[in-house]
Image: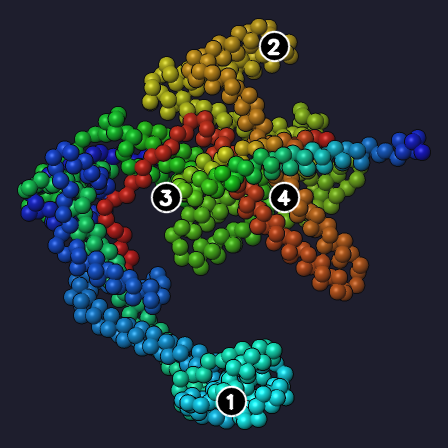
Amino acid sequence: MLSPKQMSRATIIGHKDILEQTVNSLHGINSFHIEDYNDEEQGLKIGKPFENADDVSNKLIKIRSISSFLGIKKAEVGKQNVESLFKELDTKLVELDDEVSKRTDKKNEIENNLKEHDTLSKELLPFSTIPLDLDQYRGYENLVVFSGVVKDDIELELSSITKSYELFSDPKSGTIVLFVLKEHADAVSDILPDFAFRELRVPEISGIPAELLKKLEQDIVNSQNNIESLNAEIESLRTKYSDFILASDELLSIEAQKAEAPLRIATSEQTFVIDGWVPNEDYDMLARTVEDATDGRAFISRTDVTKEEEAIVPIEYENPKISSPFEVIMDLYARPRYSEIDPTSLIFITFPLFYGMILGDIGYALILLGLAFGIKKWVKSDAIKPLMNILIYCQVSTLIFGVIYGEFLGFPLAGLETHGHYIPGLIAGFETINLFVSPFGNEMVTYPIHRTHLVMTMIVVTALVGVIHINIGYLLGFINERRKHGVAAAMLEKGSWFIIEIGLLLSALGYAGIIPTAIGIIVFLVGFVMLLKGEGIKGPIELPSLLSNSLSYTRIIAVGLSSIYIASTVNQIAFDMIMPDSFGPMTIFAIVIFIFGHALNTILSIIAPGLHALRLQYVEFFTKFYEGGGRKYNPFGYIRKYTEE
Amino acid sequence: MAVEGVVMMDPAGLKAIGAGLAVGLTGIASGIAEKDIGSAAIGAMAENEALFGKGLILTVIPETIVIFGLVVALLIK
């Protein structure tokens, strides 16, 4: 529970004849982590992929491109039988490819046409009001045609040059088509810039523009309809083939994995050597499966992990199911190393504990609990699930602390008599019970604990929680260090902290006059020297962190109070608005403020306590013992979702 | 005038100002410290996502400043 899964190194050696069976059987059991071979200097060569590798990867590329074209999404569908899928794979893939490419080609063609029509109709539009066949715009020997747009009327200036011209114009858009004799062309083109003339290209087709446009519009509508019907066909293809695509994608991925496995394996002319890691508990199963598959022709051996190998062993967590969601939090920081303590199960306790201590509100706990269960139910994602589980654990803890603190959405549940005036609670008749006077700040400890009235006490309590947490960290550090470098080193590096702490405690007792101060100082100095020897100059520099780290835990009360104050401010604003007895627009406004304010605080209630609780683990706790940096255990295999054997 | 000013000083108000300064100034200080670390951490994460944990830790280290500010503000109250 507190350490990663125990591994052994396994080596499988055999003749190349049985390589395929070996790879297949290894893939089937999905628990062998292949150590990639990449040291060709040792004389062995990296293997060649199996013969079907090209074929499989071609098909895989095809199916993936079709899948992305059709927009296939991962869904929960029934599992398909591998054998029958294999049989129909080729024919069905060809058929599917054919159907899809037919439609894509057609769609592309129509879309290209549509684009052409679009540009043509844009070009035709200015000429639409001029009743001339486009053929009449060109092909003259003695005439020059000016077609374009101008501002203002040009007839007056034009008639000063020549009387023999023909002008068609559309005053609305300013389009003109002007026919003049060739000898006047230069003079006309000189005056045209005065009217901001911009030439328009005449499309190289024949027909009256207005009629052409009408026809084009009809064409465009037709093409759009065609595209829509094609889209519908593609949609129906998607629903029809979705199962097949998902299943065959998986099948081919598995085949490709197997076919390319020799690339990770060392081979000689006739033999192969597969090197890798397997969890101890799975070794017997592995040996049996491989032997069965190869009729005992493969030689399998195992060795225990050596000290040097500890740095490269792939790490697999081994935690009870209940605390396994917290592996996500561990991975976010770093996987443990092989010989190190895996603190997942400790975080499983302390993370929700700190979260609950910070938030501690029945109302928010219930809202977030509902939210977490809802998301877990509706969002089918493997990445979301552990996070939601963590959120649920945190809310359970929040609920417990909510009962201890007696808070509901920032309202106190119990009435409280303080400094002569009375604050009513949410539950009528539920009164705060005085328990005892706390030794800090002369405050009265009560049930429920009113955090807002026990600030001093809570600051001290949270700092003490910090001291305990940090010392657990040093203890774990001691164990880790002992495993790595022996008791002496552990004593110097981590044990010295305990001695320093004891020294400080004794000095405090000495200050109070209970024992001679000298004892405390001597113990402290012993610890200090040990630390100096164990950690070097780094140790004394880190000494003040003992204080700052414990004080850092006061964030548990500080962040909690800020959350209460936000909630009670929202409540106060809303209830002050609602106070006039009559029901009016203000009442609605007050309700809106109440809902939005608490919605905002709910979101903050995930982020703030979550991040702070996380930080207390990562910064204050982990730095005392945790190194991390282990390699992820990634067994050779595949977790089938859409197919079954 | 000056005498009147002194009379107007309310100890509760001064306490509130002190508490406000404690939170506000430490908040600004944390912000200034975190902004550089944060952008560097994001840069490192863009290169290697596995650095998220370390990046988060380094980014939130100066945040202790504002927590101390908050604690001091609570003590002033």
Left or right of A613 on screen, residue A486: left
Give whichever of discs 3 and 1 has the lower sequence position. Answer: 1
Disc 1 target residue: A180
User: In the rendered image, which residue does mark 2 sit on?
Assistant: A510
Q: Residue at 5% of width from left, 42% of height from top?
A: A270
Q: Amino acid at mark 1?
A: Val
Relative vertical location of residue A486 with respect to residue A579 in this rendering, above or below: above
Front-lying residue, A224 or A605 = A224
Mark 4: amino acid = Ser
Spatial separation of the CA atoms under disc 3 and disc 1: 92 Å
Q: Tag 1: Cα neighbours inside 10 Å, few (<14), some, or many (≥20)? A: many
Closer to the camera: disc 4 or disc 1? 1
Q: Name the residue that disc number 4 marks.
A: A563
| Disc number for residue A321 | 3
* Residue furthest front in the image: A183
Q: Secondary structure at mark 4?
A: helix
| N-terminal-most mark, 4 or 1 | 1
Quadrant hosting residue A492: top left
Residue A445, visible in the rendered structure: no
Nearest to the eye among marks 4 and 3: give it.
4
Question: SS of the residue at dot 3?
Answer: loop
Residue drawn at x 17%, y 63% as measured from the top left: A86
